[in-house]
């Protein structure tokens, strides 16, 4: 278990990496935590910032359970690619509120919508930035949650060039309080994938990035 509050203002309750790749194999992260609110900090277990394009950070045969952070209750990336294989994510939480947009009604920089402190994105996995790549295969996401969007996964590529592939995986009971109001894709908030309009993928569009995967 790991805990980082205050001293890890950007997140990374157990591991914080900047400008270098991370490889996690056959590991258990349990009960990790980082800052509970904020517009961008994330990764109760692992936070990665700015790694080379097309050189993914790897998470293989590992378990992430009962983590909590403003965003990304397990792992979080900013301008970083992820490859997740044969791993389990369960009971992780994105605890922030207000997403990662400054309040247009006078809130300060980094303050979330409606004056809230920010965050609540990606119960298990949070990814934001440009030229992002994400591969998930043979993995299970169960009972993760987010206060805003993406009960299991939040992925936004701001350059609309994102590459996402999710295969042979299971997403079961990953609520996101705000997103669930829309009745949209369970557990997933995916936006900015190359070839799709700048909106969250939903309905038939999901078939462009997901195969042999159960969504409940």
Image (spheres, rainbow, N blue to C red):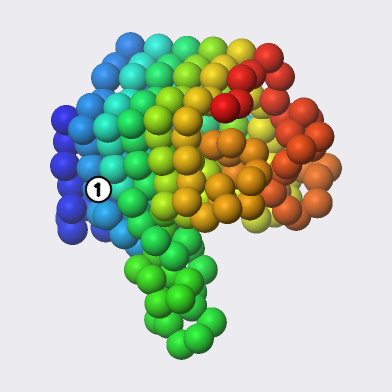
Q: Position of residue 49 (x, y in %)?
A: 43, 46
Residue 133 sits above or below residue 168 on the image: below
Neighbours of disc 1 within 10 Å: few (<14), some (14-19), many (20+): many
Frontmost residue, 107 versus 133: 107
Give the camera-side residue of 124 and 133. Answer: 124
Q: Quadrant of residue 136?
A: top right
Q: Secondary structure at mark 1?
A: loop
Tally the numbered discs: 1
Q: Is residue 6 left or right of residue 145?
A: left
At 27% from the left edge and 32% from the top edge, which residue is drawn?
A: 66
Quarter occupied by residue 186: top right
Question: Does residue 113 appear anywhere in the picture?
Answer: yes
Asked if residue 106 is positioned above or below residue 164 in the image, the reply reads: below
155 lies left or right of 64: right
Question: Is residue 141 shown left or right of residue 16?
Answer: right
Query: Which quadrant of the figure contains the C terminus?
Result: top right
Of the 4 image quadrants, the one containing the N terminus is top left
- The spot of residue 70 in percent (x, y) is 34, 53
Residue 199 pos. (x, y %) = 73, 53
Residue at image point 40% right, 81% down:
108
Q: Which quadrant would residue 61 be assigned to in this image?
A: top left
| Depth order, front residue of 214/108 | 214
> In the orientation shown, which residue stands out farthest toward the bottom?
106
Q: Residue at x 39, y 61 (%)?
A: 97
Q: Which residue position is annotated with label 1?
A: 34
Q: Residue at 52% of width from left, 50% of height from top?
A: 149
Can you see residue 56? no
Horizontal and vertical percent position of residue 153: 52, 38
């Amino acid at each position: 278990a790991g805990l980082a509050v205050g001293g890890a203002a950007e997140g990374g309750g157990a591991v914080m990496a900047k400008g270098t790749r991370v490889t996690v194999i056959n590991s258990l992260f349990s009960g990790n935590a980082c800052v509970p609110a904020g517009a961008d900090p994330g990764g109760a277990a692992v936070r990665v910032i700015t790694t080379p394009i097309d050189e993914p950070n790897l998470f293989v045969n590992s378990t992430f359970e009962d983590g909590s952070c403003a965003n990304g209750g397990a792992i979080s990336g900013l301008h970083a690619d992820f490859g997740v294989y044969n791993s389990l994510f369960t009971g992780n939480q994105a605890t922030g509120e207000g997403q990662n947009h400054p309040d247009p009604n006078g809130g300060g920089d980094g303050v979330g919508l409606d004056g809230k402190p920010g965050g609540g994105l990606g119960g298990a996995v949070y990814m934001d930035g440009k030229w992002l790549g994400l591969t998930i295969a043979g993995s299970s996401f169960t009972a993760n949650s987010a206060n805003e969007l993406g009960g299991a996964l939040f992925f936004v590529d701001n350059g609309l060039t994102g590459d996402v592939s999710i295969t042979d995986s299971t997403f079961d009971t990953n609520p996101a309080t705000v997103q669930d109001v829309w009745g949209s894709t369970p557990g997933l908030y995916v936006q900015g994938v190359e070839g799709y309009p700048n909106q969250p993928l939903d309905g038939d569009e999901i078939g462009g990035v997901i195969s042999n995967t159960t969504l409940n």
